[in-house]
Image (spheres, rainbow, N blue to C red):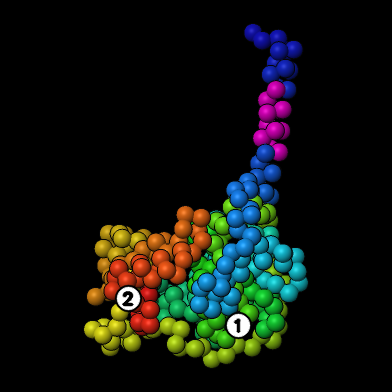
C-alpha cells in the first residue's frame, strides 16, 4: 500500500500537470500560432474585379477590432463558433439571413428573408446604414456562409459590407486573437433597405424557362452532384439537367486565400465558361 507521503507527492504532480494544461488551453483560446504573419500583411485584393468593394483583409479587420462603427458576423455553424471566433463577432450561422420556415424543398425555403423580416433581423444584430459590416466563416468547416451573408445584404442595398478574405482559416494563420465568449449584440434602429436587386439571383422559374440556353455550375461536392449525398437537406439527390460540376473548394488555396484571377479563369475554361459569359451557380 502506498504511504500518505507518496500519495501526496503523486497528487501534487497530477495537480501540477492539470495546472499546466489549463494554462496551455487558456492560451490556445486567445492566440493562434503565427505561421507567417508578414506573408499576409499586403494581400492584394485589388487584383480581383471590384475586390476592394467585396473583401477586407485579416490585417485590415484586426486594426478595426473594438471600434463602435463595425459589426462582425460569424456565419459558421454555432458549434464551430463556440470553439473559437473573432473577438466581438456575433454568431448567425449559415442560414441566419434566410427563410427557413418549413422544410427543404418548400417554396421560398432557403431564400433571403422577406424585406420586413430582414430589416428586423439586421437591426437585432446591431446593423444600421452607417456601420461597416464584416461577415466570415471557417470556410472549410462552414462552409462559405460569410459569402452568402454578404451577397444577401448587398442584394438588399447595403454597400458598406465586406467579406473577410480567407475567412477564419486565414485569420488564424496570421496568428490573430480568438475568443470563445459568446457575443450579444446591441440592437440598432431605423435601418433602411432597398427593394431587392433581382439581378443578384436566378429563381426556379428563370432556370426552368432557360434550361437549354443558360450555363449552370454545380459547386457542391462530387457526391452531392451525383446524388450519393443528400445530407445537407436536398429534397432529392442529383443535379440540375445540363449543369457542369466545379467543386467550390477548387477556387481556394490550402490557406483559404482565393486563387489568382488567372487560375480561376483557367478552371472556368475547363467547364466551358469564359470571361463575359453569363452563368448561374448553385
**Secondary structure under the numbered disc 1 in the rendered image:** loop
Measured as percent of width and height from the top left, residue 154 is found at 55, 81
Specify whether residue 14 is painted magenta.
yes
**Magenta highlight range:** 13-23
Residue at (34%, 77%) from the top-left corner?
A: 274
> Which tag is nearer the camera, tag 2 or tag 1?
2
Q: Nearer the viewer, residue 203 or 6?
A: 203
- Residue 273 numbered mark, or none: 2
User: Which corner quadrant of the image does residue 207 belong to?
Assistant: bottom left
User: Which corner quadrant of the image does residue 177 belong to?
Assistant: bottom right
Instruction: Work out whether 145 lies above or below 2.
Output: below
Q: Nearer the viewer, residue 67 or 269?
A: 269
Q: Who comes first in sequence, dot 2 or dot 1?
A: 1
In the orientation shown, which residue stands out farthest toward the bottom?
195
- Residue 159 numbered mark, or none: 1
Measured as percent of width and height from the top left, residue 93 is found at 54, 65
Instruction: Work out whether 130 lies above or below 83.
Output: below
Amino acid at each position: 500500500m502506498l504511504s500518505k507521503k507518496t500519495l501526496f507527492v503523486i497528487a501534487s504532480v497530477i495537480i501540477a500537470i492539470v495546472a499546466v494544461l489549463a494554462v496551455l488551453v487558456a492560451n490556445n483560446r486567445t492566440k493562434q500560432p503565427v505561421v507567417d504573419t508578414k506573408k499576409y500583411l499586403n494581400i492584394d485584393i485589388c487584383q480581383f474585379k471590384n475586390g476592394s468593394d467585396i473583401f477586407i483583409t485579416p490585417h485590415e479587420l484586426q486594426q478595426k477590432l473594438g471600434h463602435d462603427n463595425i459589426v462582425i458576423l460569424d456565419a459558421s455553424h454555432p458549434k464551430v463558433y463556440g470553439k473559437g471566433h473573432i473577438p466581438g463577432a456575433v454568431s448567425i450561422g449559415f442560414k441566419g439571413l434566410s427563410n427557413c420556415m418549413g422544410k427543404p424543398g418548400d417554396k421560398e425555403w432557403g431564400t433571403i428573408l422577406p424585406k420586413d423580416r430582414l430589416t428586423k433581423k439586421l437591426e437585432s444584430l446591431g446593423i444600421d446604414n452607417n456601420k461597416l459590416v464584416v461577415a466570415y466563416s471557417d470556410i472549410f468547416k462552414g462552409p462559405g456562409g460569410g459569402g452568402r451573408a454578404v451577397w444577401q445584404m448587398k442584394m438588399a442595398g447595403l454597400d458598406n459590407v465586406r467579406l473577410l478574405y480567407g475567412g477564419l482559416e486565414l485569420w488564424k494563420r496570421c496568428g490573430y486573437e480568438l475568443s470563445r465568449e459568446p457575443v450579444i449584440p446591441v440592437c440598432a434602429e431605423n435601418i433602411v433597405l432597398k427593394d431587392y436587386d433581382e439581378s443578384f439571383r436566378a429563381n426556379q422559374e428563370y432556370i426552368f424557362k432557360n434550361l437549354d440556353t443558360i450555363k449552370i455550375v454545380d459547386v457542391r461536392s462530387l457526391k452531392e452532384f451525383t446524388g450519393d449525398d443528400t445530407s445537407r437537406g436536398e429534397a432529392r439527390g442529383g443535379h440540375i439537367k445540363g449543369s457542369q460540376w466545379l467543386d467550390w473548394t477548387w477556387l481556394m488555396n490550402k490557406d483559404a486565400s482565393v486563387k489568382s484571377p488567372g487560375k480561376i479563369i483557367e478552371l472556368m475554361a475547363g467547364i466551358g465558361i469564359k470571361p463575359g459569359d453569363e452563368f448561374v451557380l448553385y
